[in-house]
Every structure is written in C-alpha cells, then in structure tokens.
Image (spheres, helix red, strand yellow):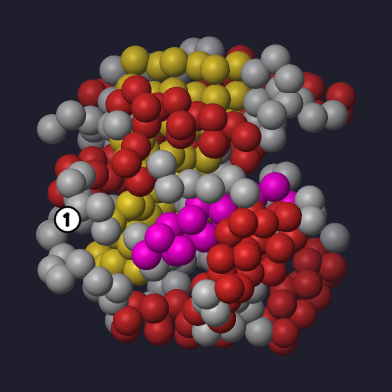
Amino acid sequence: MSLAPVLLFVYNRPDHARRAIESLRANTLAAQSELFIYADAPARPEAAAAVAEVRALISHVEGFAAVHTVVRERNWGLAANVIDGVTALTRRYGRVIVVEDDLVVAPYFLQFMNDALDMYADEPRVGHIQACDFTQDASLPDTFLILFTGSWGWATWERAWRHFNPDGRALLHQLQSRGLCRRFDFNGRYRFTRMLRRQIEGKNNSWAIRWNASLFLAGILSLNVGRSLVRNTGFDGSGTHSRAGDPYASQLYMQRLPVVRIEPIEENMQARQAFERYYARTNSLWARARRRLKQLLTF
C-alpha cells in the first residue's frame, strides 16, 4: 500500500494545532506517512503573535516519515490554501488526506483513510472519503455511500478533484436549472443552497460548499462513516469560521474500522434519511434560537 500524504492546515490557534498534530502522530501509520503543513500568514496585526506561536510549533514536528511546511508570506485564507494545497498534492501523489487544525483524529484514522483510498481508487462513482460522523445515529452502518461531502477529516483522488468547480455562480445555476436545490439541502432540512449563495455574494469564502456542489452535480458519491474517527474541537468560538456551541459533537471510535467494498455503488437512502432527521433536529428555528441563547448566556 502506497500511503497518501497528509495535508494539515494551521493558522493562529496553537493549542488546537498542537492537539491535531499529537492526534495524528498517535496514529498507527504516522511514522510511515509524509505530513505537509500549510501555515497561513496573519490577516490582521492582532493575529501576528498567535501565528508566530503556531509557526514555532510546526518547525519542530517529529514522528512522521517526513514533515514539509509551506509558510505563507501573505494571508491566503482557508479556501485558497485548501484549493492550492489539495491541487498540488493530488497532482504529485494522486491522492491526499486533509485535516484542519481544529480536528482531533482517532488512532486508526490514517489506516482507514488509506484503506478506503486503495479500495475505491479505480471507482469513478466514488470521489470523496469522510471520516467524521456527527449525527450519532445508531442506525448508520460502519460505512455507507452518500451524495454529500463532509469537510472534517477527508480524502480524495486527483481524478475526483478535477471535478472541483470554484465558480459558485455556475454551480448554483446548475442546481436551480436542474431542480436540485431541495435535494441538495437534504429535503430542505439544511440550507446548503443558501450557503452557496452567500459564497457567491462574498459573505463567506467556503471551498467546502463548492466541493460539495461539484460532486453532487456530477453524481459522485462519498464514502462516509457511521463510527466517527474525527472530532471537531473548533466550536469554541476560537476560529475564523467557528461559533460557540456544539451541535456537531462526536464520539471518537478508537478501534480499527474495516473498509469493505460496498456493492452496488449507489447512495444509501436510509443514511440520507438519517442526515435529514439530524438536520431537522439541529437546524430548526427553535434549535438555532436555543443555541444562540446559550451563546449569549455564556458571555
């Protein structure tokens, strides 16, 4: 098995970056894996000290087959960094595993990702691997196929990344003209179309919504997990795009998660319904208002 490179994005959260690196280093395949760390430059002067601390941290990372750092001279922002990094590594290696600094991964995360990358390497109908389950729905199988791409601990191949369309306006037009907006939004349970529209308007700079829409429109599936190998620690208000309160809590699965080829290659509709139930429960007007009230009472 040829191990995929691991791509880690860091910015100005040294504690989060340290936890992410430590969890990756604790993986069974860490010593055989190459780690690429992309460190962004401060967007504002007040971020400079924290950025410097992160850069000092990544200059002494050990425990991997090799560690490569890309230190930006100017602020790129997460979206441009992800697009550039994934494009560069998939061109060079044909595949990549992607982690951000607010993620903690289980000890068999790299094993699962590499097993899945090998299993579906030549299957054009599968273009994405997602190792985080935030639904905590007991009805989900260990692995399943779904027309949706999560962005917390994921992997892809160069053949699939070619489908990425950075033009949000073109993606939205296709969703609308093909009558797919409601399906893209999990039967109206989550406003992914609104997120894409806000990206077009410059109100967010999400690469993930464009990646999600790109594969959705191409009918390319994601291999997802029903036992989470990733936990997002960023919902503590510390990140550029995070907010306080955590509707996405997940319990790390600490055992090896086997990858068994799924046949036929088609979307698991029961899993899709589980996501619809999850979003109906966590994204209702009442659920959002309750989280907002909790955030206000925290400050």
Observer-nearest of 81 and 178: 178
Report if residue 58 lies within the magenta region. Answer: no
Where residue 172 sits in the image (x, y, percent)? 62, 64
Q: Position of residue 215 (x, y in %)?
A: 43, 57
Q: Position of residue 227 (x, y in %)?
A: 31, 64
Give the residues in magenta.
204-219
Above or below — where is 144 with respect to 204?
A: below
Which residue: 61% across, 73% down? 176
- Secondary structure found at label 1: loop
Q: Quadrant of the N terminus?
A: top left
Q: How many marks?
A: 1
Which image quadrant is residue 292 in? bottom right
The local crowd at label 1, few if under 14, some if 14 to 19, many if 20 or more residues have their Cα within 10 Å, is many
Q: In which image quadrant can residue 72 be found?
A: top right
Judge left or right: residue 54 versus residue 153.
right
Left or right, 296 with respect to 39, comes to right
Q: Which residue is at a point 72% across and 84% down the rendered structure image?
A: 285
Specify the principal SS of the magenta part.
helix
Q: Is residue 121 above or below residue 188?
A: above
Q: Is residue 206 magenta?
A: yes
The residue at which mark 1 appears reads as 259
